[in-house]
Structure formats: C-alpha cells, structure tokens
Amino acid sequence: MGIAYPEEVSRKKFRIFVLGSFQVACLRPVIYFLGIVLWTNGLYDPDNLSSTSIYLWLDLFLGVSTILGLWPTNILFREAKQHMTDQNLKAKFALFQAILILSSLQNSIIGTLARAGHISCSPPYSAKTRGQLMNNQLLIIEMFFVGMLTRTSYRKQDDQPGYRACDTVESQGKEKRECQQSVLTN
C-alpha cells in the first residue's frame, strides 16, 4: 500500500504544493528569530532537553517541518518527471533532498546527541562545541560531493544541437565558409 498521489495537478493544488515546499524556507528564520527572542528572556536553553523545554519543541517542530516539506516536493517531482524526461530530474531531485536533509536534520540530530551527552567532550572543546565542529566538518565534505554531483547533473551536453558554446558555433560557421570558398576556387 503506497501513498496516493493526485492524478492531475490543478493550479490551486500546484500553489498549495509550492507553499508546502516553501514553508521550510519561511519557518526556519522565524523559528530562529523566536529562539533568539526567547533566549534573551532566558526561556530558550539548548542545554535543557526535558519535555517542557522550548528548545526541544522548536527543534522538533523544525524537523517535522523539514520532513513535511519533502512531501509536496515529492509530488511536484513526480508530476514534472512525466513532462520533463530529458532534464535529468531524478538526480536533481535526489540532490535537492540530500541538501535539505544534510543542512537541517543533520544539525539537529548531532546537536541533540551532543547535548544529551552521547558525543564526549575532549579538551579544549566541550561536547556541544565538538558536535558543532563535527557537523561543520561533515557539511564541508558532504557539500563538496553534492556540488560535484550537482555540476554534472545540471551541465548541458555540448555535442547536442542548441547546446554549443557561442565560440564553437561561430568557428564552425567560419570553417564551413572557408571550405565553401576553397571548393569554389578549385
């Protein structure tokens, strides 16, 4: 039994799906701003992982928002895949999901593990700082590979008509003219 997807996407459904995907980008800064305001009031404590912690609930809300943002994106991908078969959408969509998961969920998971004491401290770094360091180092390596894969999936082929660089097209036209002139003179 699978998830039921709409057979045809109307304009209204399309807007809803776009807003569902866009809510992640909108809610993240709002939640961070709310966290900063609550932190200045002393209510937002990242070290407090109890069930009444505002930090834990906001972090959980961001994780759920990210996962829910993937659902409408998946529906839009399935619809676009039918109409844009020559655009390499599978690789582009997989990279988009990887970026979304690596940039948001990985940070939350490593941060929660560090605050819960599962990442040990080693001087001169505390467990929290070491968790942030690990996350940043992982992100650098992961985003390098994602960048390389993105470059290959978005790159257009030069050997297909319409995809040639301007200097290649001009040089080919010049070669044809030179060839025609040499045939006329012979």
Image (cartoon, rainbow, N blue to C red):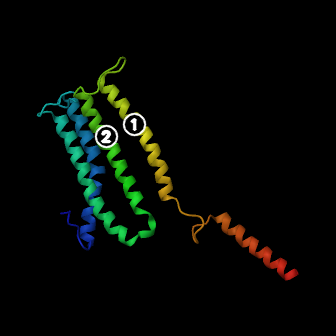
The dot on residue 138 is: 1
The percent coordinates of residue 161 (x first, y second) are: 58, 72
Residue nearer the viewer, 166 or 100: 100
Farthest residue toward the front? 1
Find the residue positioned furthest to the left. 52
Under tag 1, what secondary structure?
Answer: helix
Residue under the image location 57 percent in, 69 percent down: 160
Q: Are marks 2 and 1 in contact (CB under 8 Å)?
A: yes
What's under tag 2, amino acid-wise? Gln
Sequence-first disc among 2 and 1: 2
- Give the residue at x 39% y 37%: 138
Can residue 18 be seen?
Answer: no
> Could you say whether the residue bearing mark 2 is in a helix, strand or loop?
helix
Q: Badge 2: few (under 14), some or many (20 or more) residues near its Cα, within 10 Å?
A: some
Mark identifier at residue 106: 2
Of the 4 image quadrants, the one containing the C terminus is bottom right
**Residue 84 position in % (x across, y down):** 41, 70
Please tell me how crowded label 1 is: few (under 14), some (14-19), or many (20+) other residues with Cα within 10 Å.
some
The quarter of the picture where residue 168 lies is bottom right
Q: Position of residue 55 (x, y in %)?
A: 20, 35
In this picture, residue 123 sits left or right of residue 1:
right
Q: Amino acid at mark 1?
A: Leu
